[in-house]
Image (cartoon, helix red, strand yellow):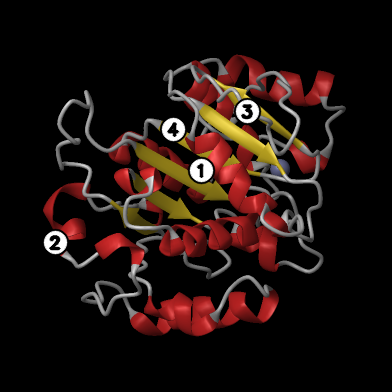
Amino acid sequence: MSARRSIVILALAGTVFASPLSAGRASPAPVVVAPPALSAWCTELSQQLKSVHHEKCVARPWKFETTTAGGHPIPYLYWGKDPAAPGPSGEQAGPRRILVVGAIHGDEISAVSAVFRWIDFLDRTKSDSFLRAHTFLFFPLANPDGFYSSPRTRTNGAGVDLNRNFSTKEWDAQAQLFWKKKASADPRRFPGKKPASELETQVVEKAINEFKPDLIISVHAPYRLVDHDGPIAFPDMQSPLPIRTLGAYPGSLGTYAGIERNIPVVTPELPNARQLPEGKAIEQLLLFIMKSKF
Ligand SMILES: [Zn+2]
């Protein structure tokens, strides 16, 4: 890995939760990273998306270590319990760790909005909500170069579909072949020349390997369904979106984490890439997923 590409995701132990990450309240936590870059990130996003409130955004303890080739940071945010805390008495496990990734595809704008809405929703939950028993790690915008290009692109700045670039076991044998034979060499689905060749893919892989999530939620659009890979049992209630399994692709996050690492990956495909569903549907989607057994 070259110096340009080096990524350091902070270990969760100590430093992160030493800051007052109390129940998601906007807190004046010690600023670890360059404020101007994060302030600019919030400004840019709030100009693009109604769901991003500038003051709220800058008040959150975002962190980032990575800037893309296009010059955009990839900030992340911890929310909730210190994962080292023991669970309530009688409960087997302590807090569960949930990694939430928005817009691995840069033209799926509603995915970014969904992640911001979920963070706001968590802030509003009551102190005894079951959601507060968990630790979330949010990456609202995993593909900023695609998001900010004009027109927006599914791929990143190098023309790689990040959701085909994860270093799955058979990547070398399968990814290019699958792209040529099954995806008709569609440039929107180009997997890259090497597994995890892209900085953005490396950021998500690092987060998986260091945060060690019990569940990954990767938000996409516009197919109006909930897909999943890996071991998860959805709750016995009406799903806000139809549950459908689309199958696994070489180099996809679902294959990398769900199939090869046994970490359940839930992939909501929102009904519209530009707009969030009306009303409380987006909050209900998070509740539905979080009521699953994983
Ligand atoms: Zn997508």
Label annotation for residue 42: none
Residue beneath disc 1 = 201
**Mark before the other along the chain sequence, 1 or 4:** 1
Q: Amino acid at mark 3?
A: Met
Indicate whether 216 appears above or below 131. above
Ligand 1 near label 4 (Cβ, under 8 Å)? Answer: no
Ligand 1 within 8 Å of the CB at mark 2: no
Mark 2 belongs to which amino acid? Ala
Tell me the element at label 3.
loop
Q: Quadrant of the N terminus?
A: top left
Task: Kindly check if marks 3 and 1 are in contact, taking CB atoms under 8 A apart as contact.
Answer: no
- Of the image marks 2 and 3, the number of the one nearer the N terminus: 2
- Residue 193 visible (yes or no): no
How far is disc 1 from disc 4 in space, using C-alphas? 18 Å
Task: Mark 2: give few (<14), some (14-19) or many (20+) Cα within 10 Å.
Answer: few
User: Does the image show residue 51?
Assistant: yes
The residue to which callout 3 is attached is 237
Q: Quadrant of ligand 1?
A: top right
Pair 3/4: label in front: 3
Q: Position of residue 127 (x, y in %)?
A: 32, 57
Q: Position of residue 68 (x, y in %)?
A: 51, 61
Return the residue nearer the eye: 186 or 110: 110
Residue at the image position 70 percent from the left and 24 percent from the top? 176
Report x, y in % for residue 241. 73, 36
Q: Which residue is mark 4?
A: 215
Q: What amino acid type should be assigned to the residue bearing mark 4?
A: Leu
SS at mark 1 in the image: helix
Q: Residue at x 63, y 22 (%)?
A: 250
Residue at mark 2 to residue at mark 3: CA–CA distance: 38 Å
Residue at the disc numbered 2 = 18
